[in-house]
Amino acid sequence: MAMDDSRLVRSATLTQGDWSLTMNTHASETAPYQPLLQELDGWYGGVGVSAQNEQRKLGHGVFPEPSLRTGRQITLGGLFFFGSEADRTVGDRFISGILWDGEFADLTVDVGGVETLTARVKLDGEIKHKPIGDDGIQWEAPLFAPDPFLYAPARTYQVFPAGFGEGLQYPLFATKKNADGVPVLDWGKGAPVGGAFGNQGNATAYPVFTVQGSWPAGFDIVTNGRTISYPAPVDPSSPVVIDNREGSVMSSGYDQTYRLTSRDWVEVSPGESIQPRIIAHAPSNGWLDIQLSDTYI
């Protein structure tokens, strides 16, 4: 009787610009070479803590200071088999040059479609490799992610101000008919109703707000009782990007954080959700994009 192989296929893709390398735990029968994922230490766990832990002078124990997470140490390793020793030599040189410039790359790990997460990494030491027979290479690359968190693919939502899309449509009596087919005045459809946007991860997520359109006197973003107020004009050609994690506001490449009169930065705890509203300071025409990623550690 055939065995039921229910193991999940795990894949790891390292991407830098137009270059990418993908490995998985199951060999492909059609690939010109066999890039097998063999090692992924630090993807689970891999993050230490940093704390002062200052000893009390007049008593036992230390002062109760919270610990901060350090960066994430990851070891990516693989086993490649080629069609010939000549191909193996070319591949060995390719492996030796992974992230040679010291710049950052994206490491994305997919676990059978159940979980897909990404970390921003750089090379953190010597790439180790050794030949296997005449056609194989076993290698590993030490990587470091300064940001210890892992991010699911970002989701983007849109929120519109009250009254958006409402107004007399022209030409009159030409855009809408009643149930009897008689032309009537059309006052627009109104804004779609916003929803609740959640974080399904196990660490705090921070949304990115992008205000699009024309807001002559600025806007307020109100989220679960917290307010970000931007009393300055917004032009359609220069959206305002609010990064709640960094605590920054950018527009056309310039820092506009100083313009805020209220800066209650928004965070989404694990398992929680937010329902942002955008309120115009004067008649405006635009909307709010919300980008949010489930965040894990």
Image (cartoon, helix red, strand yellow):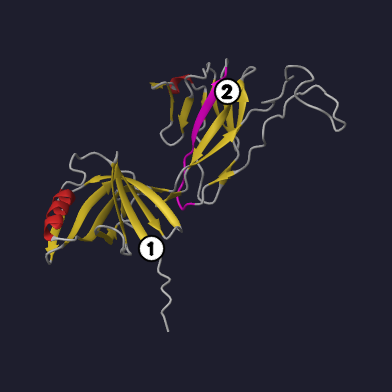
Residue 12 vertical placement versus 244 (above, below) = below
Q: Which residues are magenta?
A: 201-215
Left or right, 38 with reference to 158: left
Which residue is drawn at the image coordinates 62% and 30% (left, top)? 160
Residue 219 vertical placement versus 16 (above, below) = above
- Residue 286 visible somewhere in the drawing: yes
The numbered disc on residue 9 is 1
- Residue 44 visible somewhere in the drawing: no
The earlier-in-sequence mark between 2 and 1 is 1
Describe the element under mark 1 as helix, strand or loop: loop
Question: Is 212 contained in the magenta span?
Answer: yes
Pointers 2 and 1 in contact (CB under 8 A)? no
Q: Quadrant of the N terminus?
A: bottom left
Q: Which residue carries the number 2 mark?
A: 219
Which residue is drawn at the image coordinates 42% and 60% (left, top)? 112
Q: Amino acid at mark 1?
A: Val
Q: Nearer the viewer, mark 2 or mark 1?
A: 1
Residue 118 vertical placement versus 129 (above, below) = above
